[in-house]
Image (cartoon, rainbow, N blue to C red):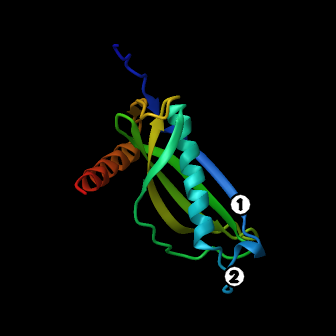
Amino acid sequence: MVQKQLQGKPVSASKVEMTELVLPGQTNTLGNIFGGRVMQLIDIAAGVAAMRHARKTVVTVFIDQLHFKNPIKMGQIMILHARVEFTGNTSMEVGVDVFSEDPLTGEQTHATTAHLTFVALDQSGKPAPVPPLILETAAEKRLFEEAGKRRERRLKY
């Protein structure tokens, strides 16, 4: 069986923005959102970006280091920006930037950045090809190169 070449898609086709108001039940005794909740939302946003790119079911297979740089406080708005930054044959790396926003001033603070790897699956649950990524800007090309280097490091293990 000959596989047809998949048509490439731009990074913009996979972009996701999620927002959530941080409520008391989501915070620890310091008034900061639980790290696990942030991780859950990162995985969801990244998964949506990967599905938009592949138009297939996807599974998370790897999450790079996650360093919480700044806390997100109760009453702040959490904003997640996700986009596919790299594609392999059946896998994609998705970058997610997380910010907090003061709802009264609009000031935003970077909280963390995460990189997750997803594999697309066909209807039988086997890895399936994903479209190549069309890089349109210098920033997208830089992120693609950085993601390729992370992939090389991961494949060594």
Front residue of this view, candidates 62 and 1: 1
Say which residue appears at 42% left-offset and 42% top-offset. Answer: 92
* Camera-side residue of 105 and 20: 20
Mark 1 sits on what residue?
20
Instruction: Assign the C terminus to one quadrant of the image.
Output: bottom left
The kind of secondary structure element at disc 2 is loop
- Horizontally, is 132 left or right of 83 in the view? left
Label 1 CA crowd tier, 10 Å (few <14, some 14–19, many 20+):
few
Amino acid at the residue labelled 1: Glu
Circle 1 — which element? strand
Residue 24 in view, yes or no:
yes
- Residue 157 falls left or right of residue 45: left
Q: Residue, x 59% and y 51% (percent of image)?
A: 45
| Residue at x-position 34% and y-position 50% | 147
The relative height of residue 152 versus residue 128 in the rendered view (above or below) is below
Furthest toward the front, the residue is 124
**Residue 55 position within the rendered picture, expressed as x and y whole percent measured from the top left:** 54, 31
Circle number at residue 45: none
Q: Please give the residue where the numbered disc 2 appears in the rendered image.
A: 31
Q: Does the CB distance between marks 2 and 1 fall below 8 Å?
A: no
* Whether residue 13 is visible: no
Residue 105 sits in quarter: bottom right
Q: Of the residues shown, which amino acid type is indicated by label 2?
A: Gly
Mark nearer the N terminus (2 vs 1): 1
From what the image shows, is residue 111 above or below residue 32? above
Give percent across and percent down for residue 10.
Answer: 47, 33
Task: Count residues near mark 2 (Cα–Cα under 10 Å), then give few for <14, some for 14-19, many for 20+.
Answer: some
Find the distance from the CA under tag 2 to the CA under tag 1.
16 Å
Instruction: Tell me residue 77's x, y (percent).
Output: 70, 65
- At 69% from the left and 82% from the top, the residue drawn is 31
Between 9 and 125, the one nearer to me in the picture: 125
